[in-house]
Image (cartoon, rainbow, N blue to C red):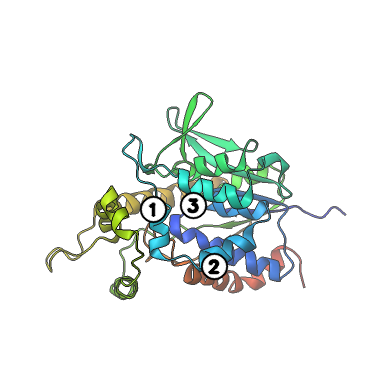
Amino acid sequence: MTTPKIGLVLGSGSARGWSHIGVIRVLSEWGIKPDIVCGCSIGALVGGIYAAGGLDEFESWLLKLKKIDVISYFDVTLASGGLISGDRLMDFFEKHLGNPDIESLPLPFAAVATDLERGREVWLRSGPLIHGIRASISMPGIFTPVRQNDRWLVDGGLINPVPVSLCRVMGADVVIAVNLNAGLSGKYGQAQRERKRAEDESDDHEKPSNFTGRLKSGFTSLLSQVRSEETDDEDSDKPGIFDVLARSLDIMQDRVTRSRMVGEPPDLTITPRLDYLGLLEFHRAAETIEEGEKRTRSMEQEIRELLNMP
């Protein structure tokens, strides 16, 4: 009897994507190793690193990451198409991972991007891994698009945030999907806002010697928009430009995901709850990974039944 191939699909979701690591960790603890991994946006980043065998080192780095460190990897550009070029971040990953071709990875992997001109889904199943990841994470307005042959590629979450269809085409018989966009259309709760504010205040002491130079480079306005600083009591809930962009993308991807999953359902969906997390709060890895672990453990019975495990 042929053993069914297990596919793991890691969805888009910006900083919420570190929860994918928690999911992978728990599955591995139970002896579950996927035969195929597909990812979109931040899911492509985590999935690509996992497929290349670099997840342990990556997680160790993430857990040491501070807010100021995140800023240092965001190379602001005045070029059209996005605020962040992403070159510095990709150079870092290439230094630590190398730049293997996707088709040569020890674990079959593919990423999803969007053809900006034609509005079509693009499956990245070959070519340099770093280039594929960079294309898939190109959040419109934030990261500049990536040129591939005769087309400009942006974030795959615009069309296929949780690429179950791609995983099926690659040969998966059983698909476990991680959806980071469920339940994001509601407002932030007051308790969640207070939690975020408290953490922001606790990080105020993080001021390395070159921080002033970075601020002068033009990142001050970007950071203040990301954090949506309150200006007065009447406008305390007024969203900043990045909040508007992030929430709009969240709502869109939630709706697209729901629609696509009707016609292309996974066999099981894990849904970490991180709706309070900001667009670029990549420094909050510990709690994000923990949520991925927690949600996966809560579905242990369903997962074991799906895979016919004792």
- In space, the residues marked 3 and 2 are separated at their CA atoms by 14 Å
**Mark closer to the chain start, 2 or 1:** 1
Q: Position of residue 122 (x, y in %)?
A: 54, 35
Quadrant into which the N terminus falls: bottom right
10 Å neighbourhood of mark 2: few (<14), some, or many (≥20)?
A: many
- Tag 3, which secondary structure? loop
Q: Amino acid at mark 1?
A: Asp
Labelled pair 2, 1 in contact (Cβ < 8 Å): no
- 10 Å crowding of disc 3: few (<14), some (14-19), many (20+): many
**Mark 3 residue type:** Ser
**SS under mark 2:** helix
Q: Earlier in the sequence, mark 3 or mark 2?
A: 3
| Mark 2 → mark 1, Cα distance in angstroms | 18 Å
Which label's residue is closer to the chain start, 3 or 1? 3
Q: Which residue is mark 2?
A: 292
* 121 up-or-down from 244: above or below: above
The label on residue 264 is none
Crowding near pointer 1: few (<14 within 10 Å), some, many (20+)?
Answer: many
Residue ID for mark 1: 250
The residue to which callout 3 is attached is 12
Name the residue rendered at 58%, 37% in the picture.
Answer: 123
Give the residue type at disc 2.
Gly
Question: Considering depth in this image, is 112 or 5 the residue closer to the camera?
Answer: 112
Q: Is residue 183 visible?
A: no
Q: Nearer the viewer, residue 140 or 176?
A: 140
The spot of residue 166 in percent (x, y) is: 62, 42
